[in-house]
């Protein structure tokens, strides 16, 4: 799941650190630590800012065709998807887990799985990619910053067997569209400095480097307003 709370599931195509959004964001951008905060690689839960009585919609999905012709279902993650996320994590190589969480990690705890599936689809959105056989092969999420409702941290993970097929591109595109629909104007991603795959993926969204740390790089993506969404996909990839 960059925050891979946002992040919270393995990532290999993209990885974002904090919220387990995946991933790799500076603590300065996060609010004051709460009691018993989630692991650093998982994004902080937006639960406290959730409006009372907000109902969670059922899962919605779309089928996409990858570069080599494979069809994949991308749908919203639900509270019952802990086994699905655990399966995705299990299929990540040690290197991909490191890229996703910016730390060595052997498993997701029950508490982390609960956190990663506790999604309201507004302040905290999460998507899963399923292969034709029903197995999970990737995940992406964003988590809105409690102190900045216009910015959200993202995290993306794709199992190794499905790298270089364009799945990360589809996950990021759908996640960005959902974030924009819910009022998010900026996406933040913290990644390992040697995560070239994620850097290339972010470049397709014209991401800009906003900070460099010890072995990490933080990017920010500016999202166009919903009315200009169709122009966004016509932009040329970054070359810088």
Image: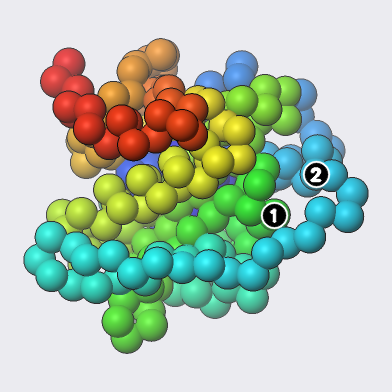
Answer few, some or many: residues within 10 Å of disc 1's Cα (few below 14, many 20 plus, some between 14 and 19).
some
Q: In this rendering, is residue 141 above or below 226?
A: below
Q: Residue at x 31, y 76 (%)?
A: 131
Q: Residue at x 58, y 51 (%)?
A: 125
Relative to residue 60, is residue 192 drawn left or right? Answer: left
Q: In the picture, which quadrant includes the C terminus?
A: top left
Q: Name the foreground residue: 5 vs 93.
A: 5
Local SS, label 2: loop
| Residue at the extreme bottom of the image, as rendered | 133
Relative to residue 186, is residue 51 drawn left or right? Answer: right
Q: Circle 1 sits on which residue?
A: 120
| Residue at the extreme left of the image, as rendered | 68
Residue 140 seen in this snapshot: yes
Q: Are marks 1 and 2 in contact (CB under 8 Å)?
A: yes
Q: Earlier in the sequence, mark 1 or mark 2?
A: 2
Q: In this rendering, is residue 219 above or below 68?
A: above
Q: CA distance from mark 1 to mark 2?
A: 8 Å
Q: Circle 2 sits on which residue?
A: 50
Relative to residue 58, is residue 47 drawn left or right? Answer: right
On the image, the x and y values in percent for residue 176 come to 44, 41
Locate residue 59: give its quadrant: bottom right
Q: Residue at x 36, y 45 (%)?
A: 173
Q: Name the foreground residue: 227 vs 48.
A: 227
Residue 94 seen in this snapshot: no
Q: In this rendering, is residue 129 above or below 203?
A: below
On the image, the x and y values in percent for residue 160 come to 24, 62
On the image, the x and y values in percent for residue 24 come to 46, 32
Which colour scheme appears in the figure?
Answer: rainbow
């Amino acid at each position: 799941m960059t925050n891979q709370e946002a992040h919270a599931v393995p990532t290999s195509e993209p990885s974002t650190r904090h919220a387990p959004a995946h991933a790799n964001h500076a603590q300065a951008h996060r609010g004051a630590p709460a009691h018993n905060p989630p692991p650093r690689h998982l994004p902080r839960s937006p639960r406290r800012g959730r409006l009372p009585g907000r109902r969670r919609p059922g899962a919605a999905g779309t089928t996409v065709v990858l570069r080599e012709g494979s069809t994949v279902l991308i749908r919203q993650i639900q509270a019952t998807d802990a086994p699905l996320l655990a399966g995705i994590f299990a299929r990540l190589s040690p290197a991909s887990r490191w890229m996703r969480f910016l730390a060595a990690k052997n498993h997701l705890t029950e508490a982390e799985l609960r956190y990663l599936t506790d999604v309201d689809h507004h302040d905290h959105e999460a998507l899963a990619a399923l292969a034709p056989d029903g197995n999970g092969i990737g995940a992406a999420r964003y988590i809105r910053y409690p102190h900045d409702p216009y910015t959200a941290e993202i995290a993306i993970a794709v199992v190794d067997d499905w790298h270089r097929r364009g799945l990360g591109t589809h996950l990021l595109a759908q996640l960005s569209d959902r974030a924009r629909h819910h009022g998010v104007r900026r996406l933040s991603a913290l990644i390992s400095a040697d995560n070239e795959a994620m850097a290339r993926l972010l470049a397709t969204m014209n991401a800009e480097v906003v900070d460099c740390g010890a072995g990490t790089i933080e990017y920010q993506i500016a999202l166009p307003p919903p009315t200009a969404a169709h122009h966004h996909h016509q932009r040329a990839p970054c070359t810088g």
